[in-house]
């Protein structure tokens, strides 16, 4: 056969082979492109933009650095959903998790009349639906706006305690901003009065516990002072304020400086309030105090724009005239000055009439002296009973129709002033009203001064000698949690809560001890406390643990029956652990069988340096990822969490069941006639 014939025969086969090879290469390129493009789109849709895709024939290689092992697995799973998983080659690296610090989680809770807003970053494990539901119950008909973001990091220590405290505080604060971090809470709020501010601060500090860092910024609106009152006295060389009001900080500083220059040595303060009659109040007070200091003794009283300057008896007339004249010319126009120089009394006039009312520490009031007529006596008795209680008032005053015309008004004003004290007395004479005693109200002296000025006029003479005692203050007198713990400990040092043999029922003698502890807890209010139960070492350890738990719970139940707030209490049995004496002797075993009360103190907090802004530095795929994404990695993590929770719950249930079985077994063993068992249980 000729060569040309062979070439002609072979050419079609060669051409077909070339075309087939070309077609195969084209098909491979199409498969590579489609695979690479499909996987890339899927990765982008799932927020996995850090992953790189490269197709080599039927193989698909994934490269890049995954933020975490879960993200790496997620990328492999995503690629496997587009092409056959066998074709996916994993060449990705995982970032060093140790170098990735968790962000600082925090919540800003804003509450006002329109509702509650939540802003901040919380762990992904936080049950946001439950949190919003709880806040909705606080907000009522108002709305709750959830603007929180989440980050998939472990929940910090003390985070849940801080959130729980923030929610508890929010219930008491209708207008507030609460910043919550792990182990720290900052509260900014407004109250209606200074007294409400004190009460609120005390409650919040007591409920915070020991290791929670609490920062309070509670503000109260300035009180409206009517009349706007100031009373400064110099008696027997000593200067003091009975009442001091100022319209701003500058005015207060100016008034106190003038008082110190006049001889004031005690720590005094002026109440800043609304109602000042003139913006030049501080200037008028400064001039008047300086004038009184120049006279050397007496008193100056402001009631709004009316000023009464009362010189001491024996002041020279020339000095009095000069000082009063200079003061009148220098006072701002709106102020009016009334000055008095008492004349020496005529000793021939005899004893001055008086009315005296005394208030005992028990709340009993005795009234003696003189009243003008039967109508005045009836009015006085009725007013006193309205103030102090019908059963607390005893009257022994006689009638005298020669008394001054304004005598009934002076007596009633004195009784009202007495009602501001815890105990003391008020004496009313034609020239003076004197009141002295002890009180638990820090501003009682100022209140009494304003009262007497309003009832009797700015020219009235009165002497106030009132001592503030912290122990009488209903707020300051509340013991601290530490003091409560110590007081209960002292009771248990001298007395002991015992139980019926082998039982968890407190015996009859222990009821009085529990009563005494309950009385202390009533004063302490809401505190976190653990009631711990202990046994000796006789018997099985598991039986002792169950018995100690039942005894601690029995004491907690007994306190609840006495109406003690125990929502923050915990009963815990320790069995035969932590002995305080040797179990080899009867005395030691008796000492080890005990109940202890201890404050619950959170574990020390480990602070982190990472700020909330670190969220911005997290990989973009974590920001874009949704907790609701249903990929295999998330499902695996969730399944692991659920399994762990279920396992923990099952373990707890098994322990509870075991404790119950052991308690039943202990009871059954008590009923056995075995001598050794009976001896052990009787000992317990």
Image (cartoon, rainbow, N blue to C red):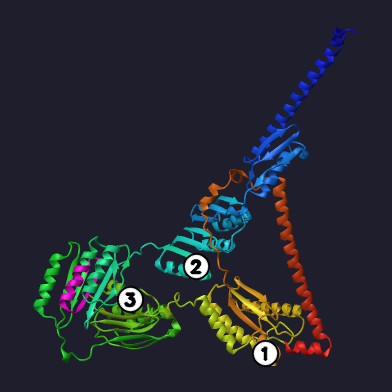
User: Could you tell me which residue is drawn at 57 percent across and 86 percent down?
Assistant: 491
Place of residue 475 in the rendered image (x, y in percent of width and height, measured from the top left): 45, 74
- Camera-nearest residue between 326 and 610: 610
- Camera-nearest residue between 440 and 7: 7
Q: Are marks 3 and 1 in contact (CB under 8 Å)?
A: no
Residue 76 sits in quarter: top right
Q: Earlier in the sequence, mark 1 or mark 2?
A: 2
**Mark 3 = which residue?**
445
Q: What element carries label 1?
A: helix
**Mark 1 = which residue?**
588
Place of residue 117 in the rendered image (x, y in percent of width and height, measured from the top left): 52, 52
Residue 45 sits in quarter: top right
Name the quarter where the N terminus is drawn: top right
Numbered range of the magenta stretch:
285-306
**Mark 2 = which residue?**
204
User: Could you tell me which residue is drawn at 21 percent across and 70 percent down?
Assistant: 307
Place of residue 526 in the rendered image (x, y in percent of width and height, measured from the top left): 55, 72
Q: Nearer the viewer, mark 3 or mark 1?
A: 1
């Amino acid at each position: 056969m000729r060569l040309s014939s062979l070439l002609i025969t072979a050419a079609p086969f060669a051409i077909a082979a070339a075309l087939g090879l070309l077609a195969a290469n084209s098909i491979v390129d199409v498969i590579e492109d489609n695979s690479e493009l499909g996987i890339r789109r899927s990765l982008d849709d799932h927020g996995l933009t850090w992953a790189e895709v490269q197709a080599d024939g039927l193989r698909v290689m994934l490269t890049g650095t995954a933020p975490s092992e879960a993200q790496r697995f997620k990328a492999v799973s995503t690629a496997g959903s587009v092409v056959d998983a066998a074709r996916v080659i994993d060449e990705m690296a995982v970032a060093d998790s140790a170098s990735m610090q968790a962000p600082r989680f925090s919540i800003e809770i804003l509450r006002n009349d329109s509702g509650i807003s939540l802003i901040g970053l919380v762990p992904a494990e936080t049950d946001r639906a439950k949190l919003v539901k709880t806040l909705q119950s606080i907000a009522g008909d108002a709305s709750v706006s959830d603007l929180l973001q989440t980050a998939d990091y472990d929940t910090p220590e003390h985070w849940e305690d801080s959130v729980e405290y923030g929610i508890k505080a929010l219930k008491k604060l209708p207008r507030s901003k609460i910043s919550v971090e792990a182990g720290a809470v900052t509260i900014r709020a407004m109250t209606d009065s200074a007294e409400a501010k004190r009460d609120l601060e005390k409650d919040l500090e007591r409920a915070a516990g020991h290791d929670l860092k609490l920062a309070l910024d509670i503000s109260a609106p300035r009180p409206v002072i009517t009349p706007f009152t100031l009373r400064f006295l110099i008696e027997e060389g000593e200067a003091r304020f009975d009442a001091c009001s100022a319209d701003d900080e500058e005015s207060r500083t100016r008034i106190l400086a003038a008082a110190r220059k006049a001889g004031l040595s005690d720590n005094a303060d002026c109440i800043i309030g609304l109602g000042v009659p003139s913006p030049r109040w501080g200037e008028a007070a400064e001039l008047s105090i300086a004038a009184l200091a120049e006279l050397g003794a007496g008193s100056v009283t402001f009631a709004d724009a009316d000023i009464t300057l009362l010189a001491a008896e024996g002041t020279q007339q020339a000095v009095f005239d000069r000082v009063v004249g200079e003061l009148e010319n220098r006072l701002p126009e709106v102020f009016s000055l009334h000055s008095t120089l008492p004349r020496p009394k005529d000793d021939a006039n005899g004893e001055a009439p008086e009315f005296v009312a005394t208030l005992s520490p028990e709340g009993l009031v005795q009234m003696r002296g003189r009243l003008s007529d039967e109508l005045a006596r009836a009015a006085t008795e009725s007013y006193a009973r309205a103030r102090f209680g019908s059963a607390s008032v005893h009257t022994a005053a006689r009638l005298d129709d020669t008394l001054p015309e304004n005598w009934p008004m002076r007596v009633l004003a004195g009784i009202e002033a007495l009602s501001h004290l815890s105990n003391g007395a008020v004496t009313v004479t034609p020239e003076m009203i004197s009141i002295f005693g002890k009180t638990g109200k820090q501003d009682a002296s100022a209140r009494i001064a304003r009262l007497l000025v309003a009832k009797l006029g700015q020219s009235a003479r009165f002497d106030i000698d009132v001592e503030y005692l912290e122990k009488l203050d209903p707020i300051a007198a509340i013991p601290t949690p530490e003091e409560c713990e110590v007081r209960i400990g002292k009771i248990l040092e001298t007395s002991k809560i015992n139980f019926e043999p082998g039982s968890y029922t407190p015996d009859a003698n222990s009821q009085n001890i529990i009563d005494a502890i309950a009385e202390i807890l009533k004063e302490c209010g809401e505190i976190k406390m653990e009631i711990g139960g202990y046994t000796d070492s006789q018997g099985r350890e598991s039986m002792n643990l169950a018995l100690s738990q039942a005894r601690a719970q029995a004491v907690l139940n007994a306190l609840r029956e006495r109406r003690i707030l125990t929502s923050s209490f915990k009963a815990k049995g320790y069995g035969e652990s932590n002995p305080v004496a040797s179990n080899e002797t009867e005395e030691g075993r008796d000492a080890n069988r005990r109940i202890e009360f201890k404050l619950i103190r959170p574990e020390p907090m480990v602070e982190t340096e990472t700020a909330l802004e670190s969220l911005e530095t997290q990989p973009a795929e974590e920001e874009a990822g949704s907790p609701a994404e249903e990929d295999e990695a998330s499902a695996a993590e969730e399944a692991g969490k659920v399994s762990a929770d279920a396992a923990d719950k099952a373990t707890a249930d098994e322990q509870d069941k075991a404790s119950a079985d052991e308690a039943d077994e202990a009871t059954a063993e008590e009923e056995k006639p075995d001598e050794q068992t009976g001896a052990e249980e009787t000992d317990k």
